[in-house]
Amino acid sequence: MKIVTVIGARPQFVKAAVVSRAIDRVEHHDQIQEIIVHTGQHFDANMSDVFFEELKIRPPDHHLGIGGMSHGEMTGRMLIAIEKILLQERPDWMLVYGDTNSTLAGALAAAKLHIPVAHVESGLRSFNMRMPEEVNRVMTDHVSTVLFAPTQIAISNLHREGIPGDKIINVGDVMYDSALHYQDQAGPRLKKFKAMGLVSGEYVLATVHREENTDDHQRLQEIIGGLIRISQRRLVVLPLHPRTRAALEATELMADAQRYLRLIDPVGYLDMLCLEMNARLIATDSGGVQKEAFFFGVPCLTLRDETEWVELVEIGANMLVNADAETINAAAIAAEDKVISNEQLYGDGAAGMAIVDCLVGQKCC
Ligand code: UDP
């Protein structure tokens, strides 16, 4: 069996590594050939290479080098390039992850060639079609053959959109598998950050990268303002996504951010898990980081108006704080001592194996 995996952005490296590892563990794995296509959507060493190294992902069979352009151009170029690869490789499955332009391009190229598409992290919805990610998710789900949903809520979303139930399978969340697998390696890394003054349980970790926040000056100003208010009480460490760095540098915000916050370059996955599990509180607009906060029992503020991971808000592990400096600061004070429930919301840590079992036809939906 031949599987073409399309990845290109940071969270996809984390998710795909789980399934690649499961392929290696499955019986008769020598009969499964995985062809990895890296679109190049993320290309910096600390947004891409470090994940291949740490998560032991095989070097890509095809690297398209398509990144750093507008949504339409990027998706269009990926579509053209992936179609060529599919015509050459003729796989049994196209495997795509999450909600990026790489996800959509991979799914669309395969669907048009009648190659079955399997979508991992299917059924997530923000119900905000202004988000490029929401467009990518909805379109991908609707051309997919098998939809691997992480939660019951994701399944309900798919049912509501009329997707037949026999195409959907609740496997749990591959990011939970990953966090469980790497947490012991990640924990002790805090000593690397001692020089910055990070003490376990005493600092706030923040990430900001969604276009709705970086490309809207008013929102970015409020978010940085909120983090600066928090920094009067607690050290705030902010690994800067390249888009956020560019947005800050283009305005007067960078000077204030540098003065009050600990700005660092994006960190590798293991360092990030370490920063998360030792944080007192996390403030983020990342989908993955919201869940990882929960995996490690750390309270989370989401710097958005809505979230796809609504179950975390329902159980009180996560609070939507929008982009308002005062709300962010007040919520941080209220949330930082919260005890987070340890419910099993995201499966049993074996989502990767369930996906591979399904693809090889052992226990499929
Ligand atoms: N991440 C990382 N280093 C960072 C920031 C995030 O390794 O500096 C990891 C994080 O732990 C999670 C994933 O990247 O596993 C989330 O990716 P991102 O926030 O870019 O995307 P989203 O989850 O919002 O799609």
Image: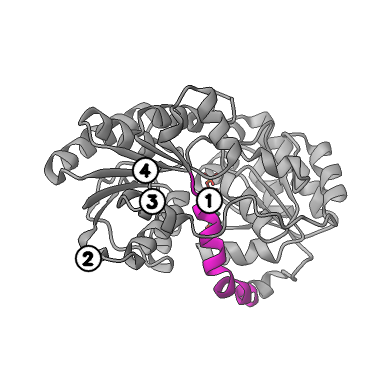
Q: In which image quadrant can residue 54 be found?
A: bottom left
Is residue 32 among what the camera can see?
yes
Ranked by sequence position, the earlier of labels 2 and 4 is 2
* SS label for mark 4: strand
| Kind of residue at badge 4 | Val
Q: How many labels, in total? A: 4
Relative to 16, is 132 on the left or the right?
Answer: right
Ranked by sequence position, the earlier of labels 3 and 2 is 2
Q: Which residues are magenta?
A: 170-192
Identify the residue at horizontal 56%, vertical 65% (top origin). Answer: 180
Relative to 228, is 108 on the left or the right?
Answer: left
Crowd around label 2: few <14 · some 14–19 · many ≥20 (10 Å): few
Counting from the top left corner in percent of width and height, residue 47 is at 45, 54
| Kind of residue at badge 3 | Lys
Q: Say which residue label 3 marks.
A: 363
Q: Nearer the viewer, mark 3 or mark 1?
A: 3
Ranked by sequence position, the earlier of labels 1 and 4 is 4
Q: Is mark 3 within 8 Å of ligand 1?
A: no
Q: Say which residue label 2 marks.
A: 30
Q: Say which residue label 1 marks.
A: 173
Nearest to the observer: residue 307 or residue 359: 359
Q: Which mark is residue 96?
A: 4
